[in-house]
Image: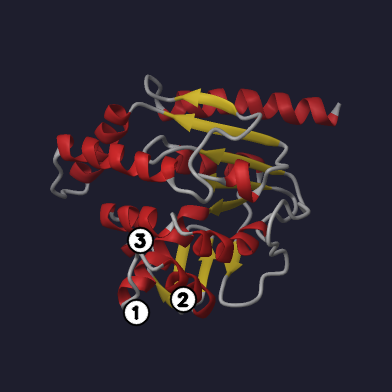
Amino acid sequence: MKQPTTLETGREPEQAAPSGAAPIAAPVITIDGPSGTGKGTIASLLAEHLGWHLLDSGALYRTLALAARRHGVDLDDGAGLGRLAARISVRLEGERVRLDGEEVSALIRTAEAGVDASRVAVHPEVRQALLGWQREAALAPGLVADGRDMGARVFPDARLKLYLDASPEERARRRYKQLKDKEMDANLPNLVQELRARDERDRERAESPLQVPPGAVIVDSTELSIEQVFARVLQFVDADLGARDA
């Protein structure tokens, strides 16, 4: 059973560090990759399988972007966003998200929120403001951390690093199906274009760009079902845990 993870911003983080890696209090497995690769689903399944905590780092950026919209802070104003991150309270309670006490879980899971999060995440002030809080999630018995810079920046000393990838066309197709299943309007060519633009923005940002972390295991999910991806990930996880416990 997955451990309940509670992470709250809006205060001074205990493990904040100006640079480099902070000590990890518990074993960490990182899962990085671009949007639409299934890393969020895989991270949740893995945390449930291991009985570990789960960190959905994207929820922090999405919630900060929502707060910026509400407070009138320009998404291109890195300094302003950094100050806002220090003022607001974001509480992650498992898969539920609260912004200043209000549950915003559904509001941050839209396509627009994802685009806004990508714009917010390019700013060094934002990534530094959230770094310490993310590291605090490394609690016993262990943490599965899902994001774009988990293995390269937030937890560079993680015991196992995974990187999920898939073609933009396949990722757009998955997103298209999700939207249609929710009876929402969607245009497949537009989704492909949006994903390519987001990938470029994430990979070219100066601070913590999207990249394959050093030493990471790459899993291409383009031709795989979510069950097949999870089975493959479990092979690497079981091999790692078994080797270290031997």
Q: 61 and 232: which one is in front?
A: 61
Residue at image x 73%, y 28%?
240
Secondary-structure class at tag 3: helix
Q: What type is the residue that disc 2 sits on?
A: Leu
> Tag 1: Cα neighbours inside 10 Å, few (<14), some, or many (≥20)?
few
Find residue 9 and report its image quarter: bottom right
Residue 243's spot in the image, x, y percent? 80, 25
Q: 214 and 44: which one is in front?
A: 214
Q: 18 and 215: which one is in front?
A: 18
Q: What label sits on residue 84 in the rendered view?
A: 2
Residue at image x 48%, y 41%?
210
Give the vertical position of 88 relative to 40 (above or below): below
Give the vertical position of 147 relative to 4 (above or below): above
Q: What type is the residue that disc 3 sits on?
A: Ile
Check if mark 2's residue and mark 1's residue have beta carbons within 8 Å.
yes
**Residue ID for mark 3:** 108
Secondary-structure class at tag 1: helix
**Position of residue 134 in the picture relative to residue 56 (left or right):** right
Distance CA(mark 1)–CA(mark 3): 16 Å
Check if mark 2's residue and mark 3's residue have beta carbons within 8 Å.
no
Give the vertical position of 117 relative to 221 (above or below): below
Q: What label sits on residue 71 in the rendered view?
A: 1
**Position of residue 211 in the picture relative to residue 195 (left or right):** right
> Tag 3: Cα neighbours inside 10 Å, few (<14), some, or many (≥20)?
many
